[in-house]
Image: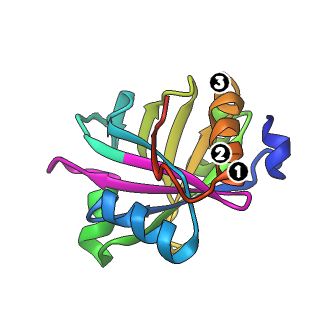
Amino acid sequence: MSLVCFGQPDNGIIQSAYVVKDIQQAMQEWATKLKVGPWFLIEHFSGQDSQYRGKPTNLDAAIAMSFAGHMLIELIQQHNDVPSVYREVVEKRGYGFHHWGVATTNFDRDVEQYRGSGCDLAFYARVPSGGRVAYMDTTAFLPGMTELIELGASFDAIFGRIYAASIAWDGKNLVRSFM
């Protein structure tokens, strides 16, 4: 299944992400109250070559993903106390909405365009799909950050599997392995 099946063009919003205090409880609440599931969980995510505000970081976070219709929903719980884009938002306004994920096939160009418009690169990492992500600090003019998500590599295969599972979900087997 390709990204086109999700109905999202390049540079379109494909994700809405939330920082949560307890990821297990949050997955259960989203499933019970909003019928979102199943959830694909990465218990310990740090990314490769991860940088927070230009410096290496040893972030440790749980990440759960599911689809609500065509929108990828991401829940994030930080496990450790290191400074991070997640901690910034929690300390500023508490748990809840954190960022939108925007698809890009021209990652480097888009990072530079955001930088050129005055947005700092707050977090960078290589991710399990084989691509890269960059959290651009858009909080000066939007109610959250904007994550640039590089398409390609195994993106379609991984997220196509999550999307297909959400379409066929019968409410059972709430939490599944990401890979």
Outermost residue to the left: 81
Whether label 2 touches label 1, CB < 8 Å: yes
Q: Is residue 106 visible?
A: yes
- Label 3 or label 1, whichever lies nearer to me, is 1
Look at the image and say whether residue 60 sits in the magenta stretch. no
What label sits on residue 20 in the rendered view?
A: none
Mark 1 — residue?
168
Element under disc 1:
helix
| Residue at image location 43% in from the left, 57% down from the top | 75
- Of residues 146 and 69, the one drawn nearer to the viewer in this rendering: 69
Q: Which residue is denoted by mark 3 in the rendering?
A: 154
Q: Main secondary structure of the magenta part?
A: strand
Q: Is residue 79 above or below residue 60?
A: below
**Disc 3 versus disc 2: nearer the observer:** 2
Colouring style:
rainbow
Q: Do the residues bearing badges 3 and 1 touch, measured as CB atoms within 8 Å? A: no
Give the percent coordinates (x, y) of residue 83.
21, 50
User: Is residue 139 visible to the viewer in this orientation of the structure?
Assistant: no
Mark 3 vs mark 1: which is more N-terminal? 3
Q: Secondary structure at mark 3?
A: loop
The percent coordinates of residue 88 (x first, y second) are 29, 62
Residue pictured at 56% horizontal, 53% vertical = 66
Report the magenta residues as a range.
Answer: 63-85
Q: Amino acid at mark 2?
A: Ala
